[in-house]
Image: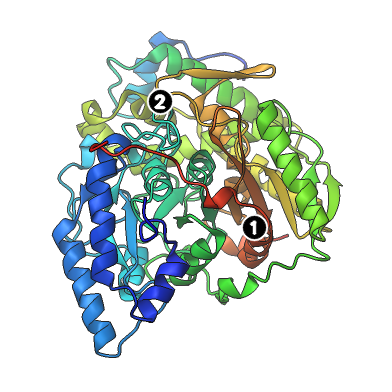
Amino acid sequence: MIGKAVQPAQLDDLAAMAELSIKGANKVEISALLLSIRLGVMRAAAALAIEYPPAPLFDPRSQRC
Amino acid sequence: MDDLIGLGIAAAAKAIASKSLSCAELTERILQRISLVDPRVRAYVEILHEQARASAMDADADIRGGKYRGPLHGIPIAVKALYDVKGVRTTSCSKVRQEYIPEADSTVVRRLKDAGAIILGMVTCHEFAFGFDSVPTRNPWNIDHIPSGSSGGTGAAVAASLCLGGTGTDTGGSIRAPAAANGIAGIKPTYGRVSKAGVTSLSWSLDHAGPMARSVRDIAVLLNIMAGTDPLDPHTIGVEVPDFTAALSGDIKGVRLGVPTNYFFSDVQPAVGDAVMGAVRLLEKLGATIVPVPMLIDDRIIDAWVAIAIAEAAVYHQHSLRTNADLYGEDVRLLLEAGELTFATTYINAQRVRMCWKSSLHEAMRDVDALVTPTLPNTAMKVGEPTIKIGSREETVFAVSARFCAPFNMAGLPAASIPCGFAPNGLPIGLQIVGKPFDEAAVLKIAYAFERNTDYHLRRPQIRSISD
């Protein structure tokens, strides 16, 4: 499932759900970018145990080394 | 270029403090240079001639009255067009913000003004800092090339001596990349070290504000003023701000420097690899211990960075993307639209990947004081060049510019770029030095030791003025 691109023609409907019009947008490029990001992120995340948490957002105290 | 124009912040401050140079004289000379050179470089969006002159005269009056404010007193500074300056159009270099005139200064600008700095004007950036081209600004080392970005206006203005220092922001390399491309120094401090209040956000969890100037000492002087907790920015943290100039001893004996054994030296232009490895050898000669460090990283960290950046940016622009979409540049609009359509699961997984990267970096840096890498895999690309081929890769300016920088935005670590050589095409090469959280002092100490034993930071682009 994660390897399937949202087809450019389907992006209009997806955007409409967010009350966003993307008429005139480069949907081929958006679709390719979304797929590329999703594949990269999912492949990296697949190597993590499910318990592995997200980075705490906006908390500089989480910095360590 | 005369000696006055070539002064750095520290040298100018010394002359001003000793009253051998007036703030008005220095400001006037820089304004004159801007009028002659900036039509070619195009770094400034708006030049505040009269305000700068008035501020400089006030600064001179303060000195005559015995009120010397310190090493930024009377120093002409450029401000990236993302930082609010009270009463001055702060456009973020976007048609979306053409009419935005802030009613208050951003915290950093207020601190600079309080320290006596003279605000010369607003300099360009990539639209909303979301890219690395910084159109229409040109690289002063060769105006057929880009200054990189997104703080390309600051980078070009500093390199071309159109200011003595300036402000930048860095979400995926936007201070370090233009510092490298323009042959100057810049530092992205630790996340939380410098207030972003009044600075237009690109991606809240990745954005950093920081200084750019022609030498390590000068960025240390600027960081001394810029750093510190701020009640207006909940992301800042109350860690003590040391005097960063105190770290500039030049002595790095015993410092342990990690050199990544993978990723950061792959697919780089030969001149870049040679210059950075030459810098590593010099740092070793100066007393540092070089430690090979394997890194748990590949291109997927960049995918995660993009996912986080576009999703957070899409939230910031959610309203104006629905009301003023046509006003955005094509490249930025595409990224924002993609951000709107990014799944929440992709964003959350990207944050998990980020956490894993931070933990692995923690392990990798356990036994070293800092890491050194190339800042960029390449020298500045030509204007309008859509992609660049390096080794086995063909990448866009966006991808190639983020490759070595963005991983340290994901981790929030302090990272500087300083010049470490020039390619055969005459363009500068940057060395990236990455430290541990809130240890900017170590980064600056290493950078300074390198700088004082080389002359790259003293070289100046030979850019013609419009009168030549």
Mark 2: give few (<14), some (14-19) or many (20+) Cα within 10 Å: some
Quadrant position of residue A63: bottom right
* Figure coloring: rainbow
B6, B208: nearer the viewer: B6
From this viewpoint, is residue B337 visible?
yes
B350, B264: nearer the viewer: B264
Asked if residue B99 is positioned above or below residue B265 in the image, the reply reads below
Quadrant position of residue B466: top left
Which numbered disc covers residue B447? 1
Q: Residue at x 53, y 52 (%)?
A: B458
Quick one: quadrant of the C terminus of chain B?
Answer: top left
How far across and down, in percent of the image, does residue B124 sit?
Answer: 32, 42
Secondary structure under tag 1 reads helix
Q: Residue at x 39, y 46 (%)?
A: B160
Q: Which residue is mark 2?
A: B144
Q: Residue at x 49, y 69 (%)?
A: B221
From this viewpoint, is residue A54 visible?
no
Q: Chain of mark 1?
A: B
**Residue type (three-letter) at the residue carrying disc 1:** Ala
Residue projecting furthest to the bottom: B66
Q: Answer yes or no: do the residues labelled 2 and 1 have beta carbons within 8 Å?
A: no
In screen coordinates, is A30 left or right of A64? Answer: left
**Residue type (three-letter) at the residue carrying disc 2:** Asp
B222, B84: nearer the viewer: B222
Q: Chain of mark 2?
A: B
